[in-house]
Amino acid sequence: MAGAFFGLDIANTALAAAQTLMDVAGQNIANDATPGYSRQVADLATTAAYAQPDMGGTYTPQLGTGVDVSSVHRVRANYLDSLFRTTQSDVGLQSTLQNYLSTTQSVLNEPGSNGLSATMNRFFGDFQTLSQDPQSAAARTSVQQDGQALAAQVQQIYQGLQNVGLQAQTQATQDVQTANADLQQLANLNTTIAQAQALGQQPNDLLDKRDSVLDSLSSLMNINVSTQVTTVGQNQVTQVTVTTPASGGGAVTLVDGGQYGSLSVTPGASGPQFTMSAQDAVSGTSSAIAPTGGSIGAAYQFVNQDLNPASAGPPPSLMYQLNQAVSQLASAVNAQQQAGFQNATGTWAAGPAFFTASGSGSPPISAANIQENPLIAQNANYVAAASTSGAAGDGSNATQIADIAGQPSGPLSQYASFVSNVGGQVDLAQNLGSTAQSLLTQVTSQRQQAAGVSINQEMTNLVQAQAMYTAASKVAQIMDSSLQALISAVQP
């Protein structure tokens, strides 16, 4: 049968459990505004029953021995964590990409009186003026000067885009350093958490920290997170594995238990082009990756796709479209200029190319190298205004060059299409970013409802725990009085 102190022992377990319940509620209330904190819950369980022997030995009734706090666990919704990280990666991609594209728009400065479209219109307008008075030195000088300004502005736009690309590449390098620090921290947390869980402990704060680092990493790049559960003795140990897709298929393991890999950025030989690789945490081998999410993915896409002059698509890259417009401008003007005649040296001859490529060799004309022909830059009389050799007053060829501006598929039209495509990509990134942000807000709210602290609920839990503590105290008081009476009764 149970001893005289049996009821007091039961009351003592209730007091300890109620104290833990109040402590947990207080911890939750204290961390209501702590970023990354997960609400904690104390699990109550009955203690092992006391077996009372009976006379016949065929039936052993069980007598309860009290209550115990079996564990204090945190509340998480794993599917919401996964959705949050995927959505946050999308937000990081689109918002960062929008910033790069918006800066590109600023470089173009369109529409406006200082944009390239206005400069091209002035250039072709100069030819129209020249056609009316081909022998005018002032008209020829205007063509010469605005041609130089046009070529210089194209190169200025090109350099501006290169600078935006270099900024994106620099930001990607910095983000990769942050990501590598996160990978190392995740591996260290895996090790520390596993050691604590193997001893039967519940490291809730460390688990929260690990989830916060995973959230941070997902804003930088696209990752896949899985949880591995093993049993050590009678205790379960949980560790996360982090992977990212490899360019050639498959996946690279970035974190596996206490092992971690690293990311690296390799700049291209020229311009803001770069490649990325990841070292596998298990094998140690490096594989090429092409991140498609987060701020790193945005820089990778902008630099290696949007600013890639060799990417003809579909869809063609922005730099490819710019080069196509510049090439068409040079080709159309040069073809008509070389079809006309000039008398720069006093002898009538076919006109030279108006635009050439700077640098050695004979590279194709592009936004990077377009320049006014040095012959024309030195002598405006090399402009071929006439369509007929020796016709000093003939400005019909200048008229035909001026007419290039109005061609439905001419360089002005193609450049306008390029500018429109830049604006379209900005709008697309903004719309996709707004959609992703709206979804992220909803997921964040749902995650907060599942794992966050409700002050009202914790106050209710606190009052219930207080009532339990008060009642257990009363039981202990009654048991103590009974023992005192018993002791007094047996004393001589």
Image (spheres, rainbow, N blue to C red):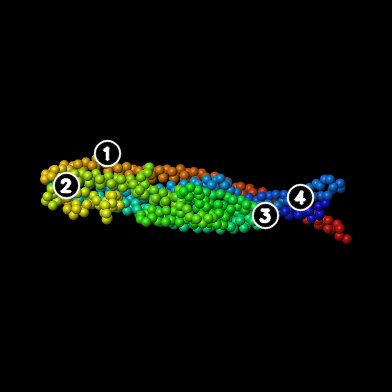
In this rendered view, identify the residue nearer to me: 95 or 329. Answer: 329
- Mark 2 or 1: in front is 2
Q: Residue type at mark 1?
A: Pro
Q: Using the numbered discs, state the Cα–Cα distance from disc 2 to disc 1 in whole angstroms.
A: 27 Å
Q: Mark 3 or 1 closer to N-term?
A: 3
* Image disc number at residue 233: 3
Q: CA distance from mark 4 to mark 2?
A: 110 Å
Which element carries disc 1, helix, strand or loop? Answer: loop
The disc labelled 4 sits on which kind of residue? Ala
Lateral position of residue 345 relative to residue 10, left or right = left
Quick check: 192 left or right of 346? right
Instruction: Mark 3 vs mark 2: give the one in front.
Output: 2
Mark 3 vs mark 1, CA separation in Å: 78 Å
> Judging from the image, what secondary structure is the residue with disc 3 in?
loop
Label 4 or label 3, whichever comes before in sequence order? 4
Q: Secondary structure at mark 2?
A: strand
Between residue 389 and residue 149, name the one nearer to us: 389
Mark 1 or 4, which is nearer the eye? 1
Query: Residue at position x 15%, y 44% from top?
Result: 386
